[in-house]
Amino acid sequence: MRNKDIEMAHEIALRVQAAGGSTYFVGGCVRDKLMGRENKDIDIEIHGISPEKLGEILDSLGKRTEMGASFGIYGLRGYGLDIAMPRKEEATGRGHKDFAVYVDPYLGTYKAALRRDFTMNALMEDVLTGKVIDHFGGIEDLHKGVLRHVNSATFVEDPLRVLRAAQFAARFGFSVAEETLALAETMDLSALASERIMGELEKALLKAPKPSVFFEEMRRMKQLDIWFPELQTLIGVEQNPATHPEGDVWIHTMMVLDQAALRRDQAAFPIDLMMAALCHDIGKSSATRMTPMGLRAIDHEKEGVPLAKRFVKRLTTEVHLNKYVLNMVKLHMRPHQLGKDRASFTATNRMFDEAMVPGDLLLLSFSDRMGRDGAIRDEEEEAFLLERLKLYEETMEKPCVMGADLVKAGLCPGPAFSKVLAFAHELHLSGVEKEKALPQVLAYAREQGITSKK
């Protein structure tokens, strides 16, 4: 698809040139090309011809689509190419979308690039000649690994740029320039929509080699308090140095987050796993106490559930993610506790049965164990837990006593049936075969006063 889009970009550029205009690759595709990174999103900007003329050119090449015609943004059906005209923007409010937009085909490359957020995103490349236009030192900043804003006056008009700075830093391993940090500190993020925050956060959690950089940069910009207050409270919460020599809970959480990033491709639900890693020790902010045995965070996994619920709900209404994170926070200590004791088959089966996604629970547990200074991977414990997971999956595939079996045996359905079925499920988790379990379940049903059909 990328080659197809580039070929169309060249065809458009030729026709625009014949009409007296110029066509440039803009934004991320120029940046990523210079960095040697793949980018499937191709954006071009058309200068020097009227919107009407551009419409004629696009119509001659295919079915024109209008993603924002009043903003000068078009597409062609069957192509992933974004086609835009130069435009000016004026802030009309505090939100990310509170802008008045004006198309100006004759704005020129300097003023057109001036509206971009960072110097690396203000680069332009002539589609026909390949010449890169760099008005603001973007190439040098790319080489230095620095995120620097283009225009102080316009940068502060869009608060989402604080989040974009953090996620770009995480994805590319860059640092935010000091002058950009200073500007970002002054910006109010409270009017941003939660889906915009979550959108930038997802990019960092799923694309960055070290997602912790996102939060470290947000911390440097003093912008944790509005959207990530539960994480901010972890800063300075001390841990027992015997088990956590790395330092406070914030440091540990960031290390676990990066460990989870190493395993996210193995997860059934990668973004859910990353959010669980972020929230797993969130309860330590209130549970940490000094005891005769030193600093302890007893029951922090239980205290963390309501805090995690509040944290996730602030960012998204996605029901599965919310349930997954709360389930993981509650259970994240269990795999290691059962693994180090080489617990019974039934005990590990119960744990896996309580987990929404048993395999992801182990990934979180492994990340938690490795997210500390001096951590040495316990391959024997991991192998034990993975083998037990396999046995659990095999157990759950075997036949078990169901409600239909009880009815077939002559029992009358009633309120106590759920208790009887729970007993049957417990026998199943213990590995009791259906043929042997059924008589036990029927006996238990009689004990509960369930009568037979007459």
Image (cartoon, helix red, strand yellow):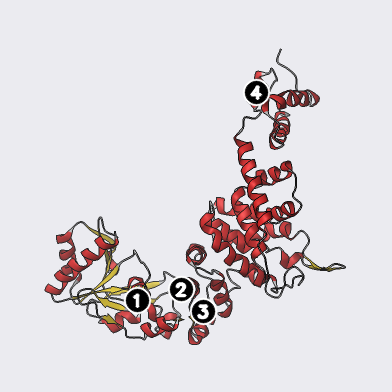
Type of the residue with mark 3: Met
Select label 3 or label 1 by which is in front. Answer: 1
Type of the residue with mark 4: Asp
Badge 3 is on which residue?
Answer: 187
Q: Nearer the viewer, residue 233 or 13?
A: 13
Left or right, 308 with respect to 34, comes to right
- Per the model, the C-alpha gap separating discs 3 and 1 is 30 Å
Select label 4 or label 1 by which is in front. Answer: 1
Quadrant occupied by the C terminus: top right
Q: Nearer the viewer, residue 355 or 63?
A: 355
Q: Nearer the viewer, residue 260 or 454?
A: 260
Type of the residue with mark 1: Leu
Type of the residue with mark 2: Phe
First reached walking from the N terminus: tag 4 or tag 1? 1
User: Residue 120: where, in percent of width, then height?
Assistant: 38, 79
First reached walking from the N terminus: tag 4 or tag 2? 2
Left or right, 6 with respect to 316, comes to left
First reached walking from the N terminus: tag 3 or tag 2? 2
Question: Which disc is residue 405 wearing?
Answer: 4
Badge 1 is on which residue?
Answer: 34
Are the two marked residues, 4 and 2, in contact with CB atoms closer than 8 angstroms?
no
User: Mark 1 falls on what kind of element?
Assistant: helix
- Per the model, the C-alpha gap separating discs 3 and 4 is 64 Å
Query: Residue at (15%, 64%) from the top-left corner?
Result: 56
Are the two marked residues, 4 and 1, in contact with CB atoms closer than 8 angstroms?
no
- Per the model, the C-alpha gap separating discs 4 and 1 is 66 Å
Question: Which disc is residue 172 wearing?
Answer: 2
Quadrant assignment, res 375: bottom right
User: Mark 4 falls on what kind of element?
Assistant: helix
User: Mark 3 falls on what kind of element?
Assistant: loop
Question: Which disc is residue 361 wearing?
Answer: none
